[in-house]
Structures are given as C-alpha cells and as structure tokens.
Amino acid sequence: MIKIENVSMKFNLGVETDNSLKMIFIRLFNPKKRNKKQYFWALKDIDFNIQKGEVVGIVGANGAGKSTILKVVSGVMKPTKGIVEANGKISPMIELGAGFDGELTARENIYLNGAILGYSKEMLDEKFEEIVEFSELRDFLDVPVKNFSSGMTAKLAFSISTIVDPEILIVDEILSVGDIKFQEKSKNKMMSLIKGGTTVIYVSHSLQSIKDLCTKAIWLDKGELVMMGNVNEVCDAYYDKQMEKQ
Amino acid sequence: MLIKNIYHNLVKYKFLLTELVKRDFKIKYKRSVLGVLWSILYPLLMMSVMALIFSHMFKFNMEGVNFLVYLMTGLVIFNYFSEATNNCLTAITGNFSLINKVYIPKYIFPLAKCLFAGINFLFTLIPLFLIVFVTGNEIEGTKCYLNIYYLIIPFIFLCTLMFTLGVGYFLSTLTVFVRDVIYIWGILLTILNYFTPIFYPIVILPSWLQAIIKFNPLYLYINSMREIILFSQMPTIKTMIAVFLSGFITMIIGMFIFKKKQDKFIYYA
C-alpha cells in the first residue's frame, strides 16, 4: 500500500536566510558573504512498507523527521533520493484548517476545503448535512472562519477531512482538538475508519494514544529509522531511551 | 499523451478551480457597496479621465477615428493583462500555507488567478461595447458598426489569455525565489503601459520605435481588436498568425519554466 524505499530528504538551511535582490548582488561581488551551503538531512535512507489496513504510529523527539515523512508520503514534498509509492486516496490531516480562508464563511469553506481535498461538488452537496452535523457548528455556518476559535476551526476541518472513507489517512497530532466531547467523538470516528480498513499513519507525542490506536510503530531519531515493529515494544524502547538520557 | 494528461487533470480539478476563482471573487468585493459594479465603472472612469486629457493632444493624427473607442479597446486589454499578472505574482507565495500541507497540483493557482481576472475582463466588455455603440458621429465617420469580423474577437481573447498565462507562470515562479519581483514588475508594467499605444496613435512615434513596439504582443492584440471594432476590417492573416504564435509560445515557455522549478518551491516558503 505504502512503500518507502531508501528515502532521503535534504534541506538546504542556507536558502532560508536572505533572498532579496540586494543580497544576491552582494553575494555576486563578495564571495565571503556567500552562503556556505549548509545541508541538513531530515530523513536518511528510510526504508519501510505499510500494508493495507495497518495502523502505524510514528514516534520520535522534536526534529526527528516525523512531519517530513508525512509530507513525503502525502506528496507535498518530493524526496531528494529514493522512491515513495502510495496507492490510494490520501486524506492528509497534517494541519487542520490549512485550506481555510478566514474571510469566507464556514459554509463557503466547506466547499473550498472539500475541493482542495479532491471531493466533487455532487458529493459535497450530498454530504453537506452530515459534515455540519458532525462538526456541531450549525449555528455558525454563515460566520467567517476568522472569527472561529481554534477548537471550532479544528472541529470543522476534522469533519470535512473524514467525511469520506479515505484509503490512507495521514494524521499529525490532531486528536487533541476540541472539547472533551469532540475528542471522544473524533477518536470514535478514527476507530470506525480503522475498522473499515483505512490505512493510517499517525504521529503523536502521546505514547498512550499511539498504543490505543496503532498496531505497529516506527521510531525515528535525527532522520534515521531506529526501530520498527510491534507498537508496545517500540513505544517502550523509545520511552526508556528518552528517560535514560535525562 | 501530454494533451490527454492536461485534459484529464483539468477535468479532475475543475471543481477546485471554480472554488478558487469563487474565493477570489468573494474576497475582492467583500464589504464593498458597489461590488462587481466597479468592474464596469473603473474602465469608464479611466477612459473619461484619459479622454479629457489626451483627446485634444492627438487630434490631428486621429482624423475620422472614434477616440473613446480607441482608448477603451486599449484599456480593457491592458487592464486585463496588468490585473492578471499582478495577481499571479503572489499566486504561489500567497498559497504556501496550503501547498505546504496538502498535495495540490501547483499550476492550478496561476491559472485560477488568470481566469479570475478573465471574469472581471468580461464585465469590462459591457462599458466597452456601450461606448462602441453609443458614441460616434455618422457624418464625421466616427460611428462604429457591428460586423462579421466580431467573430474573430473571442480568438484574440484566447490568445491574450495564453500570453498572460505564460507571463503569469513565469512571474509566479520568479517571485518564489526572489520576492523583489513584486516591486520590479510594478515598474515594468508602468513602462509597458507607456510603450503600448493605448492613448496615443503609434504614428506619432519615430519609425525605429514603431518597429520595436510592433513586437509587443499586447500591441498586436489591441491593434487587431481596433481593426475589427474601429474600422470594420479583418486583420491580415499574417497578423492573426502572429497573434496566435505570440500567445501560444509564451504560454508554453512559461509553463515549462514553472514545471521545471515547481518541486523546489516548497524550500522557499
């Protein structure tokens, strides 16, 4: 289903500094000011497969490359080296509400965000009620999203992303959104998706929620794959290692 | 193969494209009282101001020509180009938050901007044809008439769109790497505005400058429109080929550059 083969991802730290015409000229005439090419390998030779229906958690410290791997799988980034294959309709929940336009109302954003996720108009017309119902935001349908609280935005985004049963669901630390009631609801929704055979890649710092949801886990450290296997073994090993450091 | 691919993608992302255009439209006229009426009023006001200033200046060279129509044809085409390319500048950089999180074919953003400006352009045709059919004097020979060659006008629009799209793709790519382009393009547009015979007849320029300006595709499009609307004449076949090629080639080059660089965009967010 998802095949990651010798994937490496290189970031050029230098490009982030100053990109104005002024600096380009200065660099042209003054070699000393030229950016030293500073590379940073966010992923180093990562290699794994995920079968259909598997629920895989990814653990690792900040900067381990968790989010990068999600972006590579969802096609947002092309890897510097290696091959990524993902067969199936992907629903990325890397950041909830990324496709929202604050100026537009919730109603308009459902259509815009749906279109961004690749839904058709007919399908959105049909599922509109269901989305509104799930998001619990019926009273705020005609309010611009910029006036929403972060919890409300996340609820709306979650409802749109999960309205179809995606074949691959990519989730980055989002189940802690909304109030307790919604958290419970979204967790149940995830569970029902998983039972329906959706392949899930789930990134979280909460080892408990990973153990609850996932069957397998991957431990990343500084861009390298440390361990992959049974969720409990990986999580425990990761936890021990982290505690040991302190 | 390539054509089939493009067609396939256009069908697949048609809904997204319309939603993006709708979004731009809603945001542009948000909290404005007159809303879309501005698309009609703006060219009319521009024309009035320019006519007030320039109509006497160029009187001698414009014998028997409806100056208002002359102005309007130039204005609507140039305004389309200027609005569309200005929007394209930030087509990619303005959508980075999205490009960073969800996979969407990036070429859709400049396309949406050009189509959005295109809708605006269609509204500006209302005042254009209003001026064409209302003004003019039969005795002085400045009256314009509907004629069979109007059928060519959509073709000229299409070529203008292709040309604008090509420039738009190029600009949106460039802005990702060097943000200064936004300011530079503003200056270039002003220069281009004066080097396109919008409010003056080309014959007042020295002949060497005329020769250069004839390479300006915008002049080609505007001039072909004027041939049809002002003089009820069919533009020459040679002109029509030039109109098509200038648009088509620019589009291909722009798309090629965009395609070549698009995987690097994300590092410059």
Image (cartoon, coloured by chain):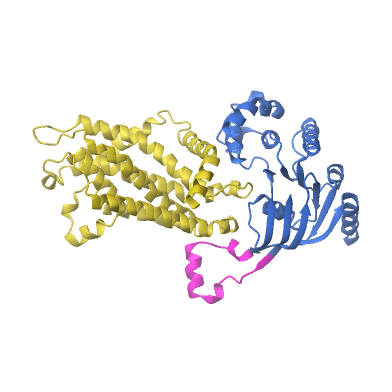
Chain colours: A blue, B yellow
Residue occupying the far left of the picture: B139
Image coords of residue B154 (percent x, y)? 32, 40
Residue occupying the far front of the picture: B1
- Residue B13 visible in image: no
Residue visible at 32% across and 50% down in the picture: B244
Quadrant of the rendered structure where residue A107 is? top right
The residues colored magenta run A13-40
Image coords of residue A206 (percent x, y)? 83, 46
- Residue B200 visible in image: yes
* In magenta segment, residue B21: no
User: Position of A211 compared to A164: left or right?
Assistant: right
Report the label total.
0
Vertical placement of residue B19 versus A62, above or below = above
User: Position of B100 compared to A192: left or right?
Assistant: left
User: Position of B238 compared to B267: left or right?
Assistant: left
- Which is nearer the eye, A135 or B10? B10
Residue visible at 57% across and 57% down in the picture: B263
